[in-house]
Image (spheres, rainbow, N blue to C red):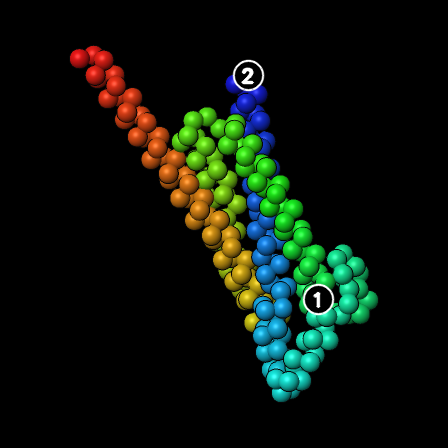
Amino acid sequence: MGMLRALGKSVISVAFCICLALTVLSFSFAQITSESFMRPVFIDIISSQTNATGFEADAVFNKTYYSGCSGLDCLKSSAGVPVFLTSGFNVFLKSVKFYFMIISAVFAVLLVLLAKGIPGKFMSLGYCLAISGLPCLILPSVAKTINMPGFELLIQGFISVISHNFFIILVIGIVLFAVGIVLKFLKFGFKIKRKKKKKK
């Protein structure tokens, strides 16, 4: 029974880590493809490349962003519009984000149920969150290797948002894991005190 519990915990942990990472990515891309994020970046790129006034660049953005595609249809759009520059794809990502959040929450609950003791529950959750947040340490280096002249601002914005969200997950994971360790030591110390009292 103990072996099955350990195996189940391992499988759930891996599934939770993967789903959590996908949740962060879908959440990040939903932020990145939002109008509030894309409009200023897009206008800066258009203005720098074409010397257009802000009004003209804004008009180009509106025409591109609200191209009319919806959901996965944006991926096969023949209009030549980048998929991340459409409001329809942003709506799709928001719905995907919601489903990933639900699945991650389910795996989190299962992991808590399978982990032994209060300290173990904190440590198991913290470990998965910390592992899932590790990409924040790699992404800045990856950004330096991407060479897309004229789109540096866009790439930097993308990496910044994604790294920030992964960093939050990493910090939460470390805190939860640390809380688990503290509780474990407190529990261990409490047991030692009880044993000493019994001997007396």
Q: Residues within 10 Å of mark 2 (few under 14, many from 20)?
A: few
Q: Quadrant of residue 83?
A: bottom right
Q: Residues within 10 Å of mark 1 (few under 14, many from 20)?
A: many
Q: Amino acid under label 2? A: Met
Using the image, determine if residue 20 lies above or below residue 40: above
Using the image, determine if residue 5 lies above or below residue 94: above
Residue at coordinates 58% horizontally, 36% vertically from top-left? Answer: 107
Using the image, determine if residue 8 lies above or below residue 164: above
Using the image, determine if residue 135 lies above or below residue 55: above
Q: Quadrant of residue 37?
A: bottom right
Disc 2 target residue? 1
Q: Name the element at disc 2.
A: loop
Q: Quadrant of the C terminus?
A: top left
Q: Name the element at disc 1.
A: loop
Disc 1 target residue? 86
* Gap in angstroms between the C-alphas marked 2 and 1: 51 Å
Q: Quadrant of the N terminus?
A: top right
**Mark 2 or 1: the one toward you:** 1
Residue at coordinates 77% horizontally, 67% vertically from top-left? Answer: 68
Label whose residue precedes the other's in the sequence (2 or 1): 2
